[in-house]
Image (cartoon, rainbow, N blue to C red):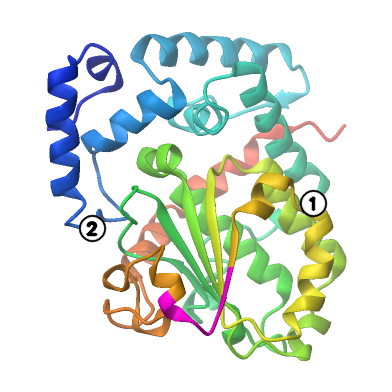
């Protein structure tokens, strides 16, 4: 059974203890990335961490739609699920959620060239290289696990901007799922085989663009970033990144080097692919890629929204 937020707000203390017991049972079976319903422990998290109730959802959706209507130069997607991404990311503080939504569309305006050819089919070549993906299972907190094997990127074949485009595309797709909106995202960045060739092909403007998007414009609840197999040259890249990161995100970055046992203290091996010292087969999730391709029309439709250019 999945409790809705409004039902959870009325649950007795005794029943909440029963829910907690059920949560422990659920944690023994990893939650799928593509789960189609919100498990009861995630509903409880929405209530406790975000203050989510049915009344608050209705109230805040009305408030943010009114703010959008009053923003004359902005045409926004106003579907419930899209707006809930921003409301949940800002714990239903409506004006903060609206500010985030404006930054989302402002990013698309500022970096308009980045959003050209911004669809799964246009980026099929990047997809086929399997450099980045969401893992098939979530962690025990319900977080989606975003994984990147940066060393697999061949900058002579694929531009960094296309890598950036595809990364943003994947995260936007994952955020359509309410469980990801509520529980957030944990990232694993594998820097094995990172070289100077990679660094020389990363424009500073593109780096700033990516940080601005993922940290300040997309409605992502970043719960942790785990960096593994980081070579000494990564210090140069991180030196460029660090001033762009806010204090909260800096505190959530963990460096493990080649010690995968250290990573497993946070993400158990039975939820990870072999490349990360796990037991879940090789690094792939074709099902997520298929969901991307099936959403081609949705991404194309997104282009009709945004700030007026004139």
Report the quarter where the C terminus lies. top right
Decide: marks 1, 2 in contact (CB < 8 A)? no
Residue named by callout 1? 111
Indicate the quadrant where residue 167 lies.
Answer: bottom right
Residue 281 appearing in the image: yes
Q: Nearer the viewer, residue 100 or 245?
A: 245
- Identity of the residue drawn at 47% across and 78% down: 130
Residue named by callout 2? 30
Q: Callout 2 environment at 10 Å: few (<14), some (14 to 19), or many (20+)?
A: some
Could you say where residue 85 lies in the image, as x and y percent from the top left? 50, 34
Left or right: residue 254 compared with residue 139: right
Q: Nearer the viewer, residue 7 or 11?
A: 11
- Identity of the residue drawn at 23% across and 11% down: 10
Report the quarter where the N terminus lies. top left
Left or right: residue 235 compared with residue 130: right
Could you say where residue 278 lies in the image, as x and y percent from the top left? 32, 78
Give the magenta part as a residue range: 255-261
Q: Nearer the viewer, residue 246 or 106?
A: 246
Could you say where residue 73 lies in the image, as x and y percent from the top left? 78, 23
Residue 95 within the segment the image draws in magenta: no
Residue 256 within the segment the image draws in magenta: yes
Mark 1 and mark 2: Cα distance apart in space: 38 Å
Indicate the quadrant where residue 282 lies.
Answer: bottom left
Q: Nearer the viewer, residue 118 or 26?
A: 26
- Identity of the residue drawn at 61% across and 10% down: 66
Instruction: Looking at the image, tell me whether mark 1 or mark 2 is earlier in sequence order.
Output: 2
Name the secondary structure under disc 2. Answer: loop
Residue 214 appearing in the image: no
Indicate the quadrant where residue 149 lies.
Answer: bottom right
């Amino acid at each position: 059974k999945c409790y809705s937020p409004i039902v959870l707000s009325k649950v007795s203390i005794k029943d909440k203890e029963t829910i907690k017991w059920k949560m422990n049972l659920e944690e023994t079976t990893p939650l799928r990335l593509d789960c189609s319903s919100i498990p009861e422990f995630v509903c409880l998290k929405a209530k406790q961490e975000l203050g989510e109730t049915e009344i608050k959802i209705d109230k805040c959706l009305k408030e943010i739609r009114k703010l959008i209507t009053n923003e004359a130069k902005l045409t926004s997607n106003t579907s419930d699920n899209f707006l809930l991404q921003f409301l949940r990311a800002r714990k239903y503080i409506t004006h903060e959620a609206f500010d985030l939504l404006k930054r989302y569309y402002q990013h698309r305006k500022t970096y308009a060239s980045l959003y050209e050819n911004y669809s799964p089919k246009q980026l099929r070549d990047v997809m086929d290289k399997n450099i980045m993906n969401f893992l098939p299972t979530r962690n025990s907190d319900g977080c989606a696990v975003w994984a990147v094997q940066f060393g697999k990127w061949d900058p002579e074949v694929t531009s960094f901007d296309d890598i950036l485009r595809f990364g943003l595309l994947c995260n936007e797709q994952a955020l359509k799922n309410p469980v990801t909106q509520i529980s957030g995202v944990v990232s694993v960045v594998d820097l094995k085989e990172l070289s100077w060739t990679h660094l020389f092909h990363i424009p500073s403007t593109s780096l700033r663009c990516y940080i601005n998007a993922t940290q300040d414009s997309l409605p992502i609840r970043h719960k942790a970033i785990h960096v593994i197999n980081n070579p000494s040259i990564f210090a140069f890249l991180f030196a460029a990144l660090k001033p762009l990161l806010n204090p909260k995100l800096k505190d959530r970055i963990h460096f493990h080097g080649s010690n995968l046992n250290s990573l497993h203290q946070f993400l158990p091996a039975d939820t990870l692919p072999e490349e990360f010292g796990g037991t879940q087969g090789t690094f792939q999730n074709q099902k997520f890629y298929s969901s991307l391709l099936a959403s081609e029309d949705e991404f194309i439709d997104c282009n009709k929204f945004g700030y007026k250019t004139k």
